[in-house]
Image: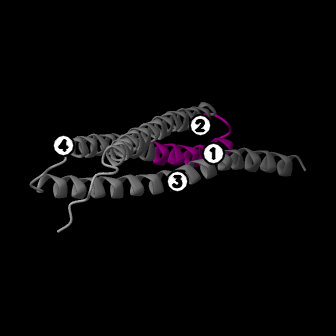
């Protein structure tokens, strides 16, 4: 009976990192999706910037906004790539933690510090990637705010032009 109890204790300890493995996997999935969206955004902004730059009457305000937005998207993609790489490493460390728990049990607990070290490093990297994801979310929010502010300024300008031109005859061809 003592052997069964020992086996169950070891298996329970090996399963504990599974929660962190699942969390890392979910973060990897959502971070990959976010990175894909940011890459598509970069491509769209590059195309818009290229299109607006080739037009004879270039809207410099719009051109500056697009260039700024492209820079912000590049920064976001770098943060996401860093977070994604860190998440993959932490996932690997959590799997190694689970395996090392079994190996320590087989070797008679001679190296009990190994799974502890692996788990701590994995948790630290998970924390680091979470910080990178928070920074990326803030960068995304700031980019949207800047774009909305620009859209509101254009709308206000168009509205004030419409008010000042009211009552004047339209030039018809």
Query: Please, what is the dominant secondary structure of the magenta stretch?
Result: helix
Q: Nearer the viewer, mark 3 or mark 2?
A: 3
Residue 95 lies, in percent from the top left, at 57, 49
- Label 1 crowd (10 A; few <14 / some 14-19 / many >=20): some
Residue at 20% across / 60% down in the picture? 171
Residue 16 is drawn in which quadrant? Answer: top right
Residue to which mark 4 is pinned: 60
Q: Earlier in the sequence, mark 3 or mark 1?
A: 1
Q: Is residue 1 magenta?
A: no
Contact between marks 2 and 1 (CB within 8 A): the answer is yes
Residue 14 lies, in percent from the top left, at 69, 48
Residue to which mark 1 is pinned: 20
Name the element at disc 1: helix
Q: Which mark is residue 49?
A: none
> What stretch of residues is rendered in magenta?
86-111
Residue to which mark 2 is pinned: 119
Q: Nearer the viewer, residue 144 or 168?
A: 168
- Report, in whole angstroms, how far the alpha carbon at label 3 lies from the one at label 1: 15 Å
Q: Earlier in the sequence, mark 4 or mark 2?
A: 4
Residue to which mark 3 is pinned: 30
């Amino acid at each position: 009976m003592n052997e069964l109890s020992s086996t169950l204790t070891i298996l329970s300890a090996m399963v504990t990192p599974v929660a962190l493995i699942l969390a890392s996997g979910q973060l990897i999935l959502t971070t990959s999706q976010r990175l894909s969206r940011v890459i598509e955004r970069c491509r769209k902004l590059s195309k818009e910037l290229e299109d607006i730059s080739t037009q004879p009457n270039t809207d410099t305000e719009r051109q500056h906004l697009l260039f700024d937005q492209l820079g912000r998207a590049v920064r976001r993609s770098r943060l996401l790539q860093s977070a994604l790489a860190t998440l993959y490493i932490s996932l690997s460390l959590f799997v190694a933690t689970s395996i090392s728990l079994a190996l320590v049990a087989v070797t008679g607990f001679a190296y009990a510090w190994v799974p502890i070290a692996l788990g701590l490093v994995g948790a630290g990297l998970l924390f680091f990637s979470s910080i990178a994801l928070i920074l990326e979310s803030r960068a995304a929010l700031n980019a949207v705010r800047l774009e909305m502010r620009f859209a509101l300024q254009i709308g206000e300008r168009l509205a004030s032009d419409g008010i000042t031109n009211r009552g004047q005859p339209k030039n018809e061809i």
